[in-house]
Amino acid sequence: MLVNLANFRSLIDIAIVSFIIYRILVLLVGTRAVQLLKGVFFMFIMLAVASFLRFRLLTWFLQTSLLALSLAVPIVFQPELRKMLEELGRGQFYMLKRHMSEDEAEVRVKQIAGALSYLKAHKIGALLVFQQEVGLGDYTQTAIPLNSKITQELIISIFWKDNPLHDGAVILDKYKLIAGGCYLPLADAPEISRWYGTRHRAALGISEVSDAIVLIVSEERGDISLAVKGKLSKNIKDFQVERLLMHYFAGEQVVTGWKAFTKALGNIFWVKKIEKDAGGLVK
């Protein structure tokens, strides 16, 4: 009886710790901390290999580096730790994230596609950044926080020429508009055509440093372009935008690299057009 009670307590103990670890990992997803964790994990693997092969100098170097990193964790992960404590205080730490249904995804796609169609028809410049695994907190912290529902009217009003936020980008995720008036890093590669303005350079810049999907509405030409992984596709059609957004909101991984980009979006954009537009970027 005592043995069974001890086993039952151990199971509860393991379950609680497992849930806490799971929730911490969920909070880290969508931030740059994930990339840092991958680097730390790789260093642990190198340390294990070095210890097994008895590389004393390399083992000492890796042990010292990991010790220094452990001291720097509160500083490096400060935004994530603060977010975790805030959710713990609000009681959201215990809630499990649910997957977005297809109906919810369709509602969001309809709102964004409608806004883009209006902006394109009236030649109103816009820059929408869809956050994926790599967090964009560095750019939202210095912008105007929105944390609002995704609606067609709000997106249009943000980019209206008299709005103070119209010059910057809007960063959003699958559930909300995170921030407006965001200033992004510009792509300064000399091979980029002079035909592209600041919005397109900003779109390429953020797509080079993150896995974000970026849609740009040209103020001069009234067309929509797509920037992913430092590559630009021009004159995207409305139905193509809707398909791309459905992939994004339905929870499917759209892009993990240039080869995956071509493969995953092959059924959305004509492959020949992608190759032509990407090739036209370099002159």
Image (cartoon, grey):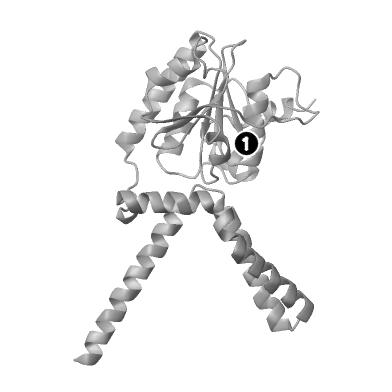
Please say if 199 is above or below 206.
Answer: above
Q: Residue 133: tell me if it is visible.
A: yes
Please say if 218 is above or below 233.
Answer: above
Q: Position of residue 124 (x, y in %)?
A: 53, 12
Residue, x 69% and y 81% (percent of image)?
51
Choose between 268 and 79: the one closer to the eye: 79
Q: Is residue 107 left or right of residue 177?
A: left
Q: Residue 136: tell me if it is visible.
A: no
Residue, x 73% and y 25% (percent of image)?
280
Choose between 162 and 280: the one closer to the eye: 162
Quarter assignment of residue 40:
bottom right
Q: What SS does tag 1 mark?
A: helix
Q: Position of residue 266 (x, y in %)?
A: 55, 36
Mark 1 burial class by Cα count in 10 Å: few <14, some 14-19, many 20+: many
Q: Position of residue 122 (x, y in %)?
A: 50, 8
Residue, x 73% and y 29% (percent of image)?
279
Residue, x 27% and y 80% (percent of image)?
9
Quadrant placement of the C terminus: top right
Choose between 79 and 112: the one closer to the eye: 79
Quadrant placement of the N terminus: bottom left
Please say if 40 is above or below 267.
Answer: below
Q: Position of residue 78 (x, y in %)?
A: 53, 52
The residue that mark 1 highlights is 207
Q: Amino acid at mark 1?
A: Ser
